Image (tube, rainbow, N blue to C red):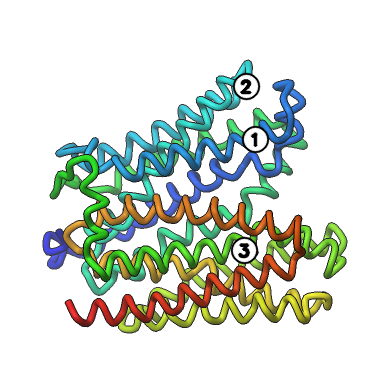
Amino acid sequence: MHLENQHRAPAWGAVFALSFGAFALVASEFLPVSLLTPIARDLHITEGQAGQGISVAGAFALVTSLFITAIAGRIDRKTILLTFTGIMIASGTLVALSPNYTTFMVARALVGIAIGGFWSMSAATAMRLVPLANVPQALAIVNGGNALATVIAAPLGSFLGSIIGWRGAFFFIVPVAALVFVWQAISLPPLKAVQRDEPGKVLTLLTRPVVALGMAAVSLFFMGQFSLFTYLRPFLETITRVDASSLSLILLLIGLAGFLGTTLIGKLIKKSVYKALVVSPFIMAAIALLLVSFGGGKATATVLLGFWGLIGTSAPVAWWTWLSRTLPNDVEGGGGLMVAVVQLAVTSGAITGGLLYDHVGYQATFGASAVMLVASCVLAVLTSRASSRE
């Protein structure tokens, strides 16, 4: 797949267009987080029902990620990516105009389809836009859009919602997505399909030990990350005892540190991707345990969480780089599999962390996070060994 671009100049404009698309998609995905109350009030539903707008997007992203390569067939990948951007525009418009809960959920399902399809093809597309040596940097740029959206999606939604209402906040994404569409249409070169997978073939990738071990490590990494991260706010409010303004600053720090991490990690993993995959979860496990012991201090918790954001947000770049090197001729199928694994892991981690937090306490939640992250570290070592034997 990647030989087609070895003698061409890197298409950095197209890479940044993908990053802008990632920003718009992730912002769309998590915008409801800060708007649940007005959504529920306006549509005459509970906040829990409004929150399912995030869950349904995740579910449709998972299904789409597994089947998109087979469904797309021989269609030019530029056309496919523009279609997903168009679906994002339709979703934002439909949410803003939703007369009832059913329409709202249909619109959220549409953005889930766009998310699953885009992320499944993002690594494969980045590989075709730059020479092999620049792939880690390209993946870091694409994930930088994700990191930036994570930083500002919730506060932006809250700010816009207070000025132009929740419908206006969602509609704000529409012109942003339209700009993404135009930029991608101009900057992306034709991307002819180079493979066609039959439905279900994606799962056969797991017959390779290096892929099976790697995906297990990915799963445990995201389970460990989100079993803790999902419950940071109640931890900071009840254990660290920060006020609302301090909470916002800490969460902003985590996001900014993550954005910094994605800009730095590209160069670090060019020659040592497995070191990043092993060291990252190990440090995060240590941070989780340190938060249990010293998280009551505001300054200590802030520093620890800054490092958590720096490592946790940038580590996925290393995993996408691993994927591009492990499956250079099947990155679309592997990307779809990884997106599905990550979606399941995030959900499972949040559920596990929540059950432990409610019934045992934050120590159990953070301890479980550390155990899962260490397990990811061990599996990353085994993945490295399996790779060396192939």
- Labelled pair 2, 3 in contact (Cβ < 8 Å): no
Look at the picture and state if 183 lies above or below 323: above
x and y, in percent, of residue 294 in the image: 78, 81
Look at the picture and state if 301 lies above or below 184: below
Residue at 25% over, 69% down: 209
Given residues 270 and 226, the one toward you in this image is 226
Given residues 345 and 73, the one toward you in this image is 345
Given residues 374 and 130, the one toward you in this image is 374
- Labelled pair 3, 1 in contact (Cβ < 8 Å): no
Number of callouts: 3
Residue at 47% over, 70% down: 315
Query: Residue under circle 1?
Result: 169
Q: Residue 49 vs residue 271: left or right? A: right
Q: Secondary structure at mark 2?
A: helix
Q: Identify the mark nearer the N-term, 3 or 1.
A: 1
Which numbered marker is on residue 255?
Answer: 3
Q: Secondary structure at mark 3?
A: helix
Q: Identify the mark nearer the N-term, 2 or 3.
A: 2
CA distance for labels 2 and 1: 17 Å
> What residue type is disc 2 on?
Tyr
Residue at 61% over, 57% down: 352
Can I make out residue 129 in this image? Answer: no
Residue lying farthest top? 99
Query: Residue under circle 2?
Result: 101
Residue at 56% over, 68% down: 258
Q: Secondary structure at mark 1?
A: helix
Q: Nearer the viewer, mark 2 or mark 3?
A: 2
x and y, in percent, of residue 48 in the image: 70, 35
Residue lying farthest front? 359
**Quarter where residue 338 is shown:** bottom left
